Amino acid sequence: MPKPGLRLRHLVFHGPNRPTAAVEFGPGLNLIYGASETGKSFVVEAIDFMLGGKPPLRDIPQRIGYDRILLGMETVSGEKFTLLRSVDGGAFRMFEGLHLTPPTEAFRAQELADQHSDKSPNNLSSFLLERCGLVGQRIRRNKSGDTNSLSFRNLARLLIVTETEITEQRSPLSDGNPIAETPNFATFKLLLTGVDDSALSVTKTKGVEDQSREAQLELLDQLLAEYRDRVKELTKNPKELEEQLGKLDSSLSEQVVALNATESDYRELASSRRDLRQKLESARERRSEISGMLGRFELLDEHYVSDISRLRGIEEGGTLFAVLGKSLCPLCGAEPTHQNSDGDCDGNADGVVAGARVEATKIELLRKELGDTVASLKREGSGFGRRLPKMEQELETVSAQIDRLVSPKLAQLRTTYAGLADKRGEVREALAVFRTIQDMETRRAILEAGPGELQGSSVAEGDLQTIVAEQFARGVESILSEWHFPDAERVYFDAKLRDLVIAAKPRGARGKGLRAITHAAFTIGLLQHCKNNDTPHPGFVILDSPLLAYRAPEGIEDDLSGTDLNQKFYDYLAALPDNRQVIIVENIDPPAAIAARPQVVMFSNNPHSGRQGFFPPVPASSLA
């Protein structure tokens, strides 16, 4: 009979006009490390998705353009196969052999449904369980002793530990869903002992009330699953929603104050700029008007000069006529003998001279007034010459202050406010859904208890046998000791907490960094226990950020950076036999000897140094 157990071999993303994004794995220790925002945690999420996780897959920008995922796997006995799934979810196609590119139609594919069913083998869960030696197993569903068929998703949370889950204060067996506590623990017990809960499946006649209760429970379970999926889309930490909403309300209030102050500054500066523009435009119009008037007045002065010259000529000619005596009449040209003062021409040259002199005097007076006006206009024009540059400079300063400081700040504040408002809307929605979940879980618990269970159930709780719990705890203690974890002695499994107690302190009561490394010890300890005791286990685990105590400790007690745990942790995993596979995702650099191993990949987040990230860099123009 083939040995049960699985190994991951590769994860590949494909898309039209996109370079292949791939990472390969092998037996024993595998490590992906490097900078943040390079796709390390996304690899973990994608593997979970390809092992039956529900869509949607996180829509990071780098994933745009990719439409298919390939997950290559093999059994410990050597059977190789590749799973293909759309990035949008849905059913799987299984191909024999390992394929780094989507197989052509020449390769025969087996269709596998994405939903578990114990009535048909043609689903991914049954396909994987069969290769783990766990197909057909049943686990306790509730305290009444009802059971469900074991699904690979029951196992997945004990195999794949995300960055969020690895630091949770709750037990590694808990996913925060009270309804799942019983099946989660039953799955853990099945792996440790190799014994399922099939013996609880006693055939009994169900009355109308029981059937109605089961139908209601089934409906509630469906609704709860939908609501939980919705909450996961909206937030990673539902219990922090109240605090998050309070912080958002406080931030929005501060943002409103800053936004109102900046808008007030903007309105004041905009009004000042508008007034300056109006004044500048009026000044320019007045200067232009003065320039036009001076031009016209110059022509008028020329006319005045011409008229005065003409009148002075008449005055001079009349004076000469009087000196010369009898001569031709200067007015009509008559001979002296024909000149008649009472006729058509009176010949009064003196009167003409006098009139010309008076008229010339009037024009000279007008010309003087015109000169005064021109001088005044020139003074006014020269004043504009001095004031206009200052007004233009002032307008430019105000405009620059608006364009370079106030407007960008106002736009940023409005964008930030809109973002916070949108986020607050999401948090409110998530909080409403989370409260609905809590209410429905309470109603479900009451409904599931039923009158019989409220009076006392006849089915035992099904706690883990003491000898098995002690054996598991000693295994974890041995692992922590080999890692040089401080105070690793006296590790035991608390049946009530369903978690480890290390040196008389509950695992969940420690800092985030220590919770992460002890969660890793719990998960690897379960793998080791199953392999050493020949109980079923898929044979691989994936841990995201187990060494958080080196990178971001919460305090002195949570800080392991001064120890050699980092070295001992990797030395232990590097020595694992080939029938076990551990995939570690980390931010901190491993020891040099580990970094040089063939199944170690570093994402640098630097296009000029090594591999930038999981997805190859794509020019921004091609994403448009």
Image: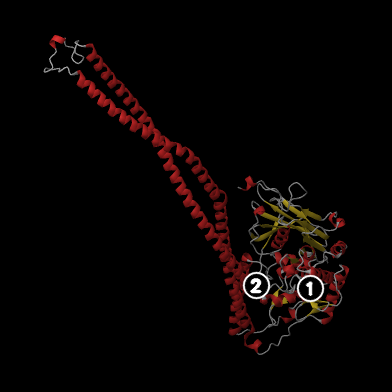
Judged left or right of residue 419, residue 181 is right
Residue 200 appears in the rendering: yes
Residue at point 83% right, 58% down?
590
Q: Residue furthest bottom?
A: 455
Which quadrant of the rendered structure holds the N terminus?
Answer: bottom right
Q: Quadrant of residue 490?
A: bottom right
Q: Quadrant of residue 79?
A: bottom right
Residue at image mark 1 = 191
Judged left or right of residue 258, residue 356 is left
Q: CA distance from mark 1 to mark 2?
A: 30 Å
Depicted 472 relative to depicted 264: above or below: below
Residue at point 53% right, 50% down?
402
Look at label 1 and name its amino acid.
Leu
Look at label 2 and name its amino acid.
Lys
- Which element type, helix, strand or loop, lies under badge 2? helix
Residue 226 appears in the rendering: no
Residue at image mark 2 = 239
Depicted 108 relative to depicted 318: above or below: below
| Residue 572 or residue 48, whichever sits in front | 572
Q: Label 1: how many residues lie within 10 Å, few (<14), some (14-19) or many (20+)? A: many
